Image (cartoon, grey):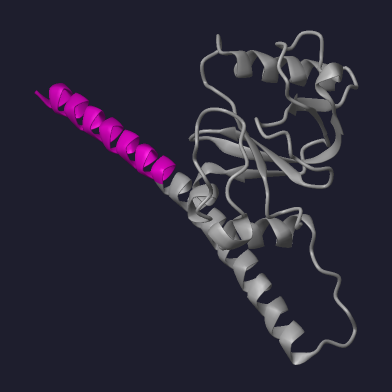
């Protein structure tokens, strides 16, 4: 089974009183103290070592980790609720995807409950190819067959497309800031003009 086809996704609520928000903040403290990231498996308990895991922040970002090991429910952290779910031990952050890029890649947007979407390779091929190209790039052999060259060109084109999306996102942010500056300059010019008129009266 491809490690990218079945991505375990854990939405993190914006509500600071919610269980998942509190657990995530606790995880950040544990990691700062040298511990590994840990999280619940989903209800089917079938996430696998080597697959990838995403913390999902709706409207903000998606943070990708790798599943390093799977522990039984008996080894869940003592601060966690008592549930028959495995504990996933995760790598450090491998990749952070902006919200705009995630939408452009047709990423799933479910907001509650850890889950695994339908096979990404079939249901969301753009996201699947993006993750595969960035997290496990293919080694470049010295001699490539025609089919392999075409496949490499397609993957490079996908990465270039995503990079263009990110550049466009940055350009939009800069244009918005420029418009604010221009508006402020215009307001200052109007204030100055009115002041000069008052002086000339």
Which quadrant holds the C terminus? top left
Q: Is residue 138 above or below residue 88?
A: below
Where on the picture, by quarter, is residue 24? top right
Name which residue lies at 88% across and 22% down. Answer: 35
Horizontally, is 188 left or right of 23 in the view? left
Where is 122 relative to 185, above or below? Answer: below
Whole-percent x, y for residue 139 in the image: 86, 70
Q: Residue at x 56, y 13 (%)?
A: 18
Q: Quadrant of residue 192?
A: top left
- Residue 131 percent location from the top left of the image: 68, 55
Q: Is residue 181 magenta?
A: yes
What residue is shown at x 61% (from left), y 39% (from top)? 62
As for residue 47 lying within the magenta part, the answer is no
Of the pair 104 and 191, the residue shown nearer to us: 104
Q: Which residues are magenta?
A: 176-201
Q: How many marks?
A: 0
Quarter placement of the N terminus:
bottom right
Residue at image location 85% in from the left, 17% down from the top:
74
Left or right: residue 167 compared with residue 78:
left
The quarter holding residue 137 reads bottom right
Judge whether 67 appears above or below 104 on screen. above
Q: Left or right of 98: which side holds 194?
A: left
């Amino acid at each position: 089974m491809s490690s990218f086809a079945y991505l375990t996704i854990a939405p993190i609520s914006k509500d600071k009183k919610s269980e998942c928000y509190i657990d995530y903040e606790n995880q950040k403290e544990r990691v700062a103290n040298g511990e590994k990231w840990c999280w619940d498996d989903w209800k089917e308990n079938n996430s696998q070592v080597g697959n990838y895991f995403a913390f999902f922040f709706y409207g903000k970002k998606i943070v990708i980790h790798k599943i390093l090991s799977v522990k039984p429910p008996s080894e869940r952290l003592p601060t966690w609720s008592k549930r028959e779910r495995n504990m996933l031990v995760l790598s450090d952050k491998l990749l952070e995807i902006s919200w705009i890029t995630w939408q452009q890649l047709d990423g799933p947007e479910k907001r509650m409950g850890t889950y695994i979407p339908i096979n990404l390779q079939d249901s969301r091929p753009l996201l699947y190819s993006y993750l595969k190209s960035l997290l496990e790039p293919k080694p470049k052999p010295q001699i490539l067959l025609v089919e392999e060259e075409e496949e490499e060109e397609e993957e490079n084109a996908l990465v270039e497309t995503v990079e263009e999306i990110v550049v466009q996102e940055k350009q939009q942010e800069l244009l918005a800031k420029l418009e604010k500056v221009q508006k402020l300059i215009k307001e200052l010019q109007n204030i100055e003009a009115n002041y000069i008129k008052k002086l000339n009266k």
